[in-house]
Image (cartoon, grey):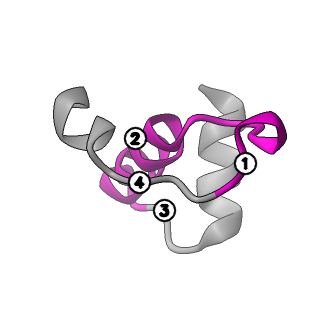
Amino acid sequence: MSLVFSQIEYPPVERTRVHLLTDILIIKILSVIAKGKGWEDIENYGLSK
């Protein structure tokens, strides 16, 4: 699965990146599976895991 995400271009400059794109996408997907309904739910899910 990470092979698919590794092919996606991530525009921010390398030195300003705080999180990996794959981490952001995985947290988003898992949050939606866990019935997250908005950005706050996604943030809370990411912080709790």
Of the residues shown, which amino acid type is indicated by label 2? Answer: Ile
Under mark 3, the amino acid is Gly
Q: CA distance from mark 2 to mark 3?
A: 13 Å
Q: CA distance from mark 3 to mark 1?
A: 29 Å
Considering only vertical position in the picture, is 11 above or below 4?
A: below
> Can you give x and y, in whole percent of width and height, for residue 26 in the image?
40, 41
Secondary element under disc 4, as helix, strand or loop, is loop
Give me the residue at 43% from left, 49% from top.
Answer: 25
Graded by Cα atoms within 10 Å as few (under 14), some (14 to 19) or many (20 or more), the crowding at tag 3 reads: some
User: Which residue is rendered at x = 69% and y = 52% of the image?
Assistant: 43
Mark 4 vs mark 3, foreground winner is 4
Residue mark closest to the camera, 2 vs 4? 4
Q: Is residue 40 magenta?
A: no
User: Which is more N-terminal, label 4 or label 2?
Assistant: 4
Q: What is the crowding at mark 1: few (fewer than 14 residues within 10 Å), some, or many (at least 20)?
A: few
Q: As displayed, is residue 46 above or below residue 38?
A: above
Question: How far is disc 4 from disc 3 in space, using C-alphas?
Answer: 26 Å
The residue under label 1 is 13
Residue type pointed to by label 1:
Val
Residue identified by numbered label 3: 36
